[in-house]
Image (tube, rainbow, N blue to C red):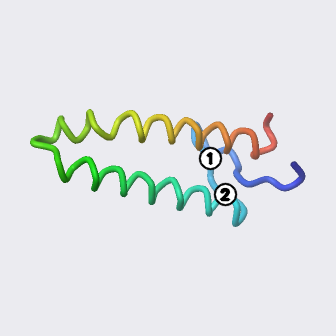
Amino acid sequence: MNKRWFRPWGWLYLPVSWQGMTLTVLLIAFWVNVFLAVDRHSHSASDTLYGIFPYVASSFLLGVWIAYRTSGEA
């Protein structure tokens, strides 16, 4: 890869290109959609947290992996 999508910022990564911003917006939109879908059928806050955790955690890790691979550190 020639162009960097992200730059390191502490433990996280900040988008520096349109590809990085697109990935970030898609991840946030996915998380909001998952929250709304799970929360619709939950009976308590813990139900919601247990329901969204696998989706949010796995997509967050995928996003961090992509950010690491496109930040020029790899």
**Residue annotated with mark 1:** 13
Secondary structure at numbered mark 1 = strand
Secondary structure at numbered mark 2 = helix
Give coordinates of residue 62: x percent, y percent. 58, 38
Give coordinates of residue 7: x percent, y percent. 71, 49
Task: Quarter of the image for the C terminus: give it.
Answer: top right
View extreme (bottom): residue: 18
Give coordinates of residue 13: x percent, y percent. 62, 46
Under mark 1, the amino acid is Tyr
Foreground residue among 23 and 72: 23
Residue at the image point whose x is 75% and y is 45% from the top: 71
Residues at marks 1 and 2, CA–CA distance in whole angstroms: 10 Å
Tag in front: 1 or 2: 2
Foreground residue among 15 and 32: 32
Mark sitting on residue 20: 2
Mark sitting on residue 25: none
Foreground residue among 60 and 13: 60
Q: Badge 1 local density, few (<14 within 10 Å), some, or many (20+)?
A: some
View extreme (left): residue: 43
Q: Earlier in the sequence, mark 1 or mark 2?
A: 1
Q: Is residue 63 left or right of residue 43?
A: right
Under mark 2, the amino acid is Gly
Q: Is residue 49 left or right of residue 6?
A: left
Q: Is the Cβ of the residue at disc 1 closer than 8 Å to that at disc 2?
A: yes
Give coordinates of residue 16: x percent, y percent. 70, 60
Q: Quadrant of residue 53?
A: top left
Q: Is residue 65 above or below residue 5?
A: above
Q: Is residue 24 above or below residue 45?
A: below
Q: Is residue 51 left or right of residue 20?
A: left
Residue at the image point whose x is 56% and y is 56% from the top: 24
Residue at the image point whose x is 21% and y is 50% from the top: 39
Q: Is residue 23 left or right of residue 41?
A: right
